[in-house]
Image (spheres, grey):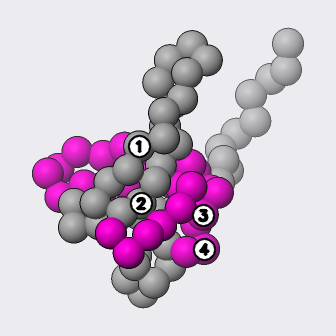
Amino acid sequence: MPWQMTMQYLINQPVGVSLTDGTGVSGILCSITHQEIYLLEYLYHTQFALRHYPLNQVRDVLPFPACNGPTPPLY
């Protein structure tokens, strides 16, 4: 199923976004309009930024996978 059809189910979820220029970004998908997606991205320390990307620059939107690896020891 194309990402445009499933993206609405990813709102408020951590996603990776592949852009048409070959770069990628990740964050929480906050909203979708007819022209843009809005992504809450971590900058540094305690700072976050709500950034928007035109849909014509988005190649794919993928949910983060579950953490199914080995459980590290607790200290």
Q: Which disc number belongs to residue 11? A: 3
Q: CA distance from mark 3 to mark 4?
A: 6 Å
**Quadrant of the image occupied by residue 36:** bottom left
Q: CA distance from mark 3 to mark 2?
A: 10 Å
Name the element at disc 4.
Answer: helix
Indicate the amino acid at tag 3. Ile
Q: Do the residues bearing badges 2 and 1 touch, measured as CB atoms within 8 Å? A: no
Please name whichever residue, 33 or 62, is drawn nearer the observer in this view of the structure: 33
Foreground mark, 4 or 2? 2
Q: Which disc number belongs to residue 51? A: 1
Q: Which disc number belongs to residue 9? A: 4
Q: Is residue 22 magenta?
A: yes
Please name whichever residue, 54 or 22, is drawn nearer the observer in this view of the structure: 54
Of the image marks 3 and 2, the number of the one nearer the N terminus: 3
Q: Which disc number belongs to residue 37? A: 2
Name the element at disc 3.
Answer: loop
Q: Residues within 10 Å of mark 3 (few under 14, many from 20)?
A: some
Please name whichever residue, 3 or 36, is drawn nearer the observer in this view of the structure: 36
Q: Residue at x 23, y 45 (%)?
A: 23
Please name whichever residue, 64 or 54, is drawn nearer the observer in this view of the structure: 54
Q: CA distance from mark 4 to mark 1?
A: 19 Å
Indicate the amino acid at tag 4. Tyr
Name the element at disc 1.
Answer: strand
Of the image marks 4 and 2, the number of the one nearer the N terminus: 4
Indicate the amino acid at tag 2. Ile
Q: Which residues are magenta?
A: 8-35
How far across and down, in percent of the image, does residue 51 sit?
A: 41, 43
